[in-house]
Structures are given as structure tokens and as C-alpha cells.
Image (cartoon, grey):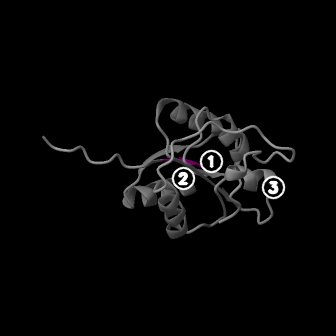
Amino acid sequence: MTIAPERRPLVLVVDDDDDHNLVMTMSLEALGYEVRAADSCAAAHAVAASENVDALLSDLSLGDGNALDLVRGLATRPRVAIVLTGFDDVGAAVRGAFDAVLLKPATIDRVDEILRRALTDRREPTPPSEPGVDGASSDPSRRRGAA
């Protein structure tokens, strides 16, 4: 009897910029991740509803919403959620909802470092917590700040 290899972590990449989406997807696949790509909040929700997503890597501004609404709307929060933004000043609500906030262009090495560190923590995915007063998570364990 053979032991099944451990499942590769599934990363959901969400970006409405096709080129950035493709580069991130191909780079993460080359590093050994299983990757699904989405170009909108609606497409990301469809993927998350049908697959066990371990990590979310999303652009902040999307054509049909934003990453903050996306992560709050997921039935099950991935073990790690990273937001990419072109803005160097994001509010507390964004920082509180994500494990890392990275300024574009983020290097694949930095994304990989954050993913590997977070995914080695074997905790189970959790439902999103209710927003706090400023829109940030009211659960202190969810407020990790920027990476």
C-alpha cells in the first residue's frame, strides 16, 4: 500500500489585470502550488464555493468590488489571505482583514515566503469574523498587520 502524497496548497489568485494574473499564476505553479485564477469577485466566489482554497492572493481593487468585500464574503476564510495594492496608504480595515498587505509590484519570492510561513501553520480554515468598529476584524488573532 502506498501513502498518498500530501495535497499541494491551493492558491486562489484574483486580479482583473490579465497579465498580472497570468504571471502570478504561472510563478506560483512553478513553485509547486496548485493555482486557480479569477478576474473578479464573482469568479473568485465561484471558485471558493467549489474548491478547498488554502490561500487567497488578491488585488485590492477589482472591477466588480474589492478584496475586502471578497474576503469578508467567503463562507470559509482561507488559511492565509494576502492583498496586493498600488496604494501605499491603505486603511486599518484592509490591514486588519488580511495576513499581509503588499505593495505592487510584489516579488514572487516575498509572496512565496508569506504563503509558506502561513501554510506550515496547520490550523483549519475559519469563517470570517464580524467587523470591528473601524471595519477591521474584531478578533485580535486576525489582525496581523502588513508584512
Callout 2, which amino acid? Asn
Label 3 CA crowd tier, 10 Å (few <14, some 14–19, many 20+): some
Does residue 60 appear in this view?
A: no
Mark 1 or 3: the one toward you: 3
Residue 14: x percent and y percent? 58, 47
Disc assigned to residue 92? 3
Q: Earlier in the sequence, mark 1 or mark 3?
A: 1
Q: Earlier in the sequence, mark 3 or mark 2?
A: 2
For label 2, the crowd category at 10 Å Cα-Cα, with few meaning under 14, some 14 to 19 and many 20 or more, is: many
Locate residue 73 relative to residue 80 in the image: left or right. Answer: right
The percent coordinates of residue 110 (x first, y second) are 54, 68
Q: Which residue is mark 1?
A: 16
**Residue in the picture at 82% in, 56% down:** 91
Q: Which residue is mark 2?
A: 21
Q: Residue at x 78, y 48 (%)?
A: 136
Magenta residues: mostly which secondary structure? strand
- Looking at the rendering, the stretch of residues picked out in magenta corresponds to 11-15
Q: Where is the N terminus found, in terms of image quarters?
A: top left
